[in-house]
């Protein structure tokens, strides 16, 4: 088990949702944190120790990701764990999805992960091995990494890309004892879908009668804490989803049928941001 007390952890997307909950869990366990997101006012208002470093960072800017890592090392002298959590999604049928929408989500969800991890890697490599590990990279992907959702091709593709990135990196770093963990939440109660509706310009409703598993952010964060203490290749906070998406990979026509039945539909225009 890795000890959380004194561990230096960078969390992106810490101003809300899963990242905020993870910050609270790790703060309570005595970790030293760097909390990053674009909205610094929300980071400043988090009910965690005032000693943690808080930075306004847009992860789509790779230079800003490098500055985030450099500032962490300047403050704490090391980095033990990096959690690439910042991300968003939106709804759009492939035929309607613009180049700008594809590029923007790719820059945040994928290149934001890549830039953070590349900046942190030299520092993780410098650490001594402690509790069997030199350090850890964690990326918050999604259950959709294994089975894409209709009308969410761009988002699903970014989550699959994060999974591929982690699978490759994990084996590259195996001999150096740097753990790499991808996290695969199912639908989680956060601002995620409100943001998705806002970016989409429409409110998308679930299929009537659909009983999909929904988790709280605390349950997801608790599973992530367990995977930080005891690193594993993949973290599935709702374990059944691993088998359901695995079945969908083995039997794609069944996956298609289920996804078709559960397809969300646009219900209304989203009010302009700020309303
Ligand atoms: N909620 C779900 O159902 C669900 C399911 C599977 C996977 N996930 C994944 O879980 C992660 C966290 O999502 P969540 O549910 O916690 O959503 P959320 O409540 O909307 O939080 C998203 C976080 O990411 C930050 N963020 C977004 N774009 C950013 C950027 N360009 N630069 C820096 N920070 C940025 C936001 O902060 P600022 O706006 O202040 O920058 C916020 O802190 C995402 O990667 C998402 O894909 C969510």
Image: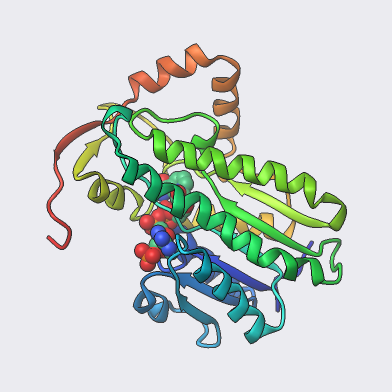
Rendered image coloring scheme: rainbow
Residue 225 found in image quarter: bottom right
Quadrant of image for the N terminus: bottom right
Q: How many labels does the image show?
A: 0
Residue 108 found in image quarter: bottom left
- Asked if residue 9 can be seen in this view, the reply is yes
What residue is rendered at 30% in x and 47% in y?
196
Question: Which quadrant of the figure shows ligand 1?
Answer: bottom left
Residue 204 found in image quarter: top left
Residue 62, x across and y down, in percent: 52, 64
The answer to which of 4 and 117 lies nearer the viewer is 117
Residue 250, x across and y down, in percent: 61, 17
Q: Is 99 left or right of 216, judged from the image as shown?
A: left
What residue is rendered at 63% in x and 39% in y?
164
- Asked if residue 188 can be seen in this view, the reply is no
68 versus 163 height, above or below: below
Quadrant of image for the C terminus: bottom left
What residue is rendered at 13% in x and 55% in y?
272
Residue 136, x across and y down, in percent: 71, 60
Q: Is 5 left or right of 65, judged from the image as shown?
A: right
Q: Is 131 left or right of 25, judged from the image as shown?
A: right
Residue 38, x across and y down, in percent: 39, 69
Q: Is 60 left or right of 116, judged from the image as shown?
A: left
The answer to which of 63 and 90 lies nearer the viewer is 63
116 versus 267 height, above or below: below
16 versus 152 height, above or below: below
What residue is rendered at 64% in x and 66% in y?
119
The answer to which of 4 and 9 lies nearer the viewer is 9
């Amino acid at each position: 088990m890795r000890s959380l007390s004194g561990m230096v952890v960078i969390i992106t997307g810490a101003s809300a949702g899963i990242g905020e909950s993870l910050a609270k869990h790790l703060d309570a366990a005595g970790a030293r944190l760097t909390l990053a997101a674009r909205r610094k006012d929300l980071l400043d208002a988090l009910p965690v120790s005032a000693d943690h470093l808080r930075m306004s960072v847009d992860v789509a800017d790779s230079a800003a990701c490098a500055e985030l890592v450099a500032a962490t090392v300047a403050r704490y002298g090391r980095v033990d764990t990096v959690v690439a959590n910042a991300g968003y999604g939106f709804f759009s049928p492939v035929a309607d999805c613009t180049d700008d929408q594809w590029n923007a989500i790719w820059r945040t969800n994928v290149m934001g992960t890549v830039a953070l991890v590349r900046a942190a890697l030299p520092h993780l490599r410098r650490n001594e091995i402690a509790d069997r590990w030199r350090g850890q990279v964690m990326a918050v992907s999604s259950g959709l990494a294994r089975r894409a959702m209709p009308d969410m091709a761009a988002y699903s593709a970014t989550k699959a890309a994060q999974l591929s990135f982690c699978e490759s990196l994990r084996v590259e770093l195996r001999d150096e004892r740097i753990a790499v963990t991808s996290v695969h939440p199912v639908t989680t109660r956060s601002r995620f879908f409100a943001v998705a509706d806002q970016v989409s310009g429409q409110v998308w409703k679930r299929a009537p009668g659909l009983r999909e598993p929904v988790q709280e952010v605390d349950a997801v964060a608790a599973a992530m804490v367990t995977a930080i203490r005891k690193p594993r290749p993949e973290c599935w906070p709702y374990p059944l989803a691993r088998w359901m998406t695995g079945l969908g990979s083995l039997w794609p026509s069944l996956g298609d049928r289920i996804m078709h039945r559960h397809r969300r539909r646009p219900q209304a225009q989203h009010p302009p941001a700020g309303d």
